[in-house]
Structures are given as structure tokens and as C-alpha cells.
Image (cartoon, rainbow, N blue to C red):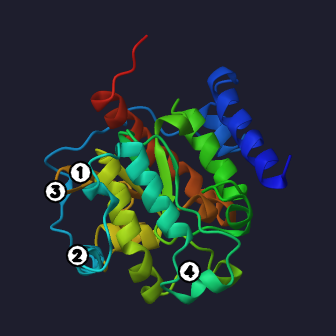
Amino acid sequence: MSQEERERKQREKEVAEEKGGKQSTLFDFLGNNSEAPQDGNPLQTPSEDSCSKNGTSDFKEITTEAASLTHDPALNPALNKEEILQSWGNSCRECQKCSLYQQRTQAVFGEGNVHAVMMLVGEAPGADEDRQGFPFVGNAGKLLDNILKAISVLRTEIYITNIVKCRPPGNRLPYHGEVESCAYYLSKQIEIIDPAIIVCLGSLSTKSLIDSEAKITLMRGQWCEIGDRWYMPTFHPAALLRDPKKKKPVWEDFQQIKAYYDHINPKQT
């Protein structure tokens, strides 16, 4: 069995164990020395107080321009939704639109349920993701798994991807041109999966998808409606590893996400 096959089987095993594993609690996520949010703060869903955007980021213009340059597998009536997304993934893995392809082990297109109600969008793959080919499998990914377990959401329920699909050298933030090169792939992922909720993990994701002038410290925790989707910006899990004080506000953000997710996606018992 190849190393890639062993890693894929291990990943499948970890996902399967989520269903039968011990339920994570708030304190599993926050840490034993952290305090829980004070009572009296009810879970919030999108409301009239939420922000409403007309898509002030560059994302819409970039993807519209790229559309004229890219063949769309969706034009093939013989393909179903999974096959269309897989076709885009294959195209992404062969992409050479920016210089990041020269140093990558592989492009990391995304992972999850093609029919997901919720999509999580990070910034770019790290070393572990570049090696294994899956998003959020390093230390930040393990923390994200804990967050999801704490709100009783399985990775198999949702879809996870990044703004940029190839690892930037030294894990630096992607340059604007690199974001532009990958924008159409993310646009097609959103179009095909059609999630009702998009969680923007970190500043780059928030600026790319909500507002190019956004400041994550000011916008996190606020629902933003763009078109027929609701966006929730929050800190990237890697930021929580650098600054554990950010864990509590992220937990509060994911409580809001959980409340709305359950509202529009009630689970059968």
C-alpha cells in the first residue's frame, strides 16, 4: 500500500470515528483554565441586525473575468453534481496559473459533502495539507475538528476548502495574484455545492468573500448576507494556536453558526 493510500485510509478512519467518539465539550475546546461564556447570551441566528453586503470584495469581478477563459464541466449534461466537482478538482490539481505550482507537492482542492448546507473556507494549505492532499489536517485542522465536535457537526456533513489551493512558501499569506488565480475554482465550488452558510476562517477569507476592506477583529461574529447566502467571519484556527485568548470569541461565533445550522438543517433523530 502506498503512503498516499495509507494516509487516505487513516483520514477515513478518523472521520468515521467522529460518529462514535466521545462528545467534546466547551472546555475540551477552550481548555481547562478558560471560563465559559456568561449565561444570558442566547444563541443568535441571522436577523435584521445582521450586515448586508453587495459583494464589495474583488471576488465577483475576478471570477466573472475568469469564467470566459475556463471550460465549464457543468455544460456536460452527462455529469452529476459529484462528477462536476471532481472534474473541477482534477483541473485544479493540474493548474499552473501562478508560480505556487512550482513548489507544491499537490494542490488541495477541498474535502467534504457535495450537498453540504455549510462550507468552511480557510486561507491556504500548510505543509501537512500539501503532503496529504486534504484541507485542515495539521495542528490548526485538529483544533478545527475539536470545534466541530463541540457543536456536534461532523466533517462529513460539511465542505471544507481554502481561498488558495496550493501552499505558499513558508506558509506566508497568499499574494493578490495568487488569490486571483484560484478565485474561479472557489467560485465553482460555491456554485456547485450551493451552501446556505459560508464560514470565513481568517482575514484573507473574509476580505476575499465579504469585503476587501474588512478587519476580522471588527467583523467576526457578525452575520453578513450576500445574495441568498449567510456568511460568518471568525478567526482562523491557526490564530487560536498563536493566541489562546481568541478561543472564547471563536466559540461564541460557532455557537451562532450551530444555532442557524440546526435551524435550517434539522437532524433526524
Tell me residue 144's x, y (percent). 60, 49
Front-lying residue, 141 or 162: 162
User: Eyeballing the image, is 33 above or below 216?
Assistant: above
| SS at circle 2 | helix
Which numbered disc flags the more N-terminal residue, 3 or 4?
A: 4
- Residue type highlighted by circle 4: Leu
Cα distance in 3D space between marks 3 and 4:
28 Å
User: Eyeballing the image, is 157 above or below 180?
Assistant: above
| SS at circle 3 | loop
- Contact flag, marks 3 and 2 (Cβ < 8 Å): no
Q: Which residue bears the numbered disc 3?
A: 227
Q: Which residue bears the numbered disc 1?
A: 229
Q: Is residue 50 left or right of residue 164?
A: left
Which numbered disc flags the more N-terminal residue, 3 or 2?
A: 2
Q: Is residue 175 left or right of residue 226?
A: right
- Residue type highlighted by circle 3: Gly
State the residue at coordinates (62%, 30%): 25
State the residue at coordinates (65%, 53%): 141
State the residue at coordinates (33%, 29%): 265
Q: Which mark is residue 173?
A: 4
- Residue type highlighted by circle 1: Arg
Q: Which residue bears the numbered disc 2?
A: 64
Cα distance in 3D space between marks 2 and 4:
24 Å
Cα distance in 3D space between marks 1 and 3:
6 Å
